[in-house]
Amino acid sequence: MKPISAELVKQLREKTGAGVMDCKQALTESEGELDKAVEFLRKKGLATAAKRAGRATSEGTIQSYIHMGGKLGVMVEVSCETDFVAKNEDFQEFARNIAMHIAASNPLGIGPEDISKDVLDKEKEIYRAQAAETGKPENIVEKITEGKLSKFVKDSCLMSQPYVRNPEISVADLLNELIAKIGENITVKRFVRFQVGDE
């Protein structure tokens, strides 16, 4: 195998924001293939995030984003473990970017548990009616309904939405990359989105 060049390490760092040693390890593991190295770092980020998931997050920041000449605004609370990380520029930038993402994508909640049963029941009713109009058998109608409902939940939850600034990754991927980079548990606690004229 050819040695890993500094240029390749630099490219991977620019692409992922990971540390030099992590980039070298990822490139070694993936035999110098950039895409595989990115995937390796993603998986490592997931593993790091899983290890830290149980740790308390009592510090953090509240960031806001105002758009359309003051007609749309978002406030988001992002939590971390220490005051040191709360002041970290990468952490602050992540929180600002999440506020901007929420303004653009209008999620209904952070995860599936945040979407109310009423909303889900209403969507299910609509999908069932649409599927029934196809004239397919009941078991197929049920599968179509469940598939559409599952997609609705995925599209409506902040964590599973494609990140607006890089649709190749989800918001959860972005968060896991930050957790891997910073080394602390980080959570998006809550958000509120205001739009002039909305009830």
Image: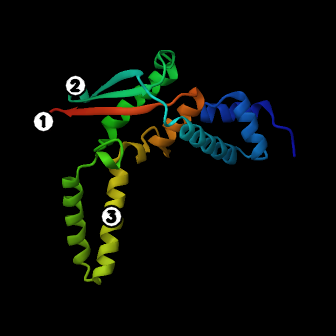
Image coordinates for residue 105, horizontal then vertical, percent? 33, 42
Q: Residue at x 41, y 26 (%)?
A: 79
Rendered image quadrant of residue 4: top right
Image coordinates for residue 100, horizontal then vertical, percent? 36, 32
| In the rendered image, the vertical position of residue 44 relative to residue 89, given as above or below | below
- The reply, left or right, for residue 9 in relation to residue 81 is right
| In the rendered image, the vertical position of residue 21 relative to residue 31, given as above or below | above
Type of amino acid at the residue the image marks with label 1: Gly
- The reply, left or right, for residue 143 in relation to residue 34 is left
Q: Looking at the image, tell me whether mark 3 or mark 1 is earlier in sequence order.
A: 3
Rendered image quadrant of residue 133: bottom left
Q: Looking at the image, tell me whether mark 1 or mark 2 is earlier in sequence order.
A: 2
What is the distance, in whole Å, between disc 2 and disc 3 at their CAs? 34 Å
Q: Disc 1 designates what residue?
A: 197
Type of amino acid at the residue the image marks with label 3: Lys
Q: Disc 3 designates what residue?
A: 148
Image coordinates for residue 153, horizontal then vertical, percent? 33, 54
Image coordinates for residue 179, horizontal then vertical, percent? 54, 32
Between disc 3 and disc 1, the foreground one is 3
Q: Disc 2 designates what residue?
A: 70
Q: Residue at x 51, y 15 (%)?
A: 84
Q: Quadrant of the C terminus?
A: top left
- The reply, left or right, for residue 171 in relation to residue 177 is left
Q: Secondary structure at mark 3?
A: helix
Q: Residue at x 43, y 33 (%)?
A: 187
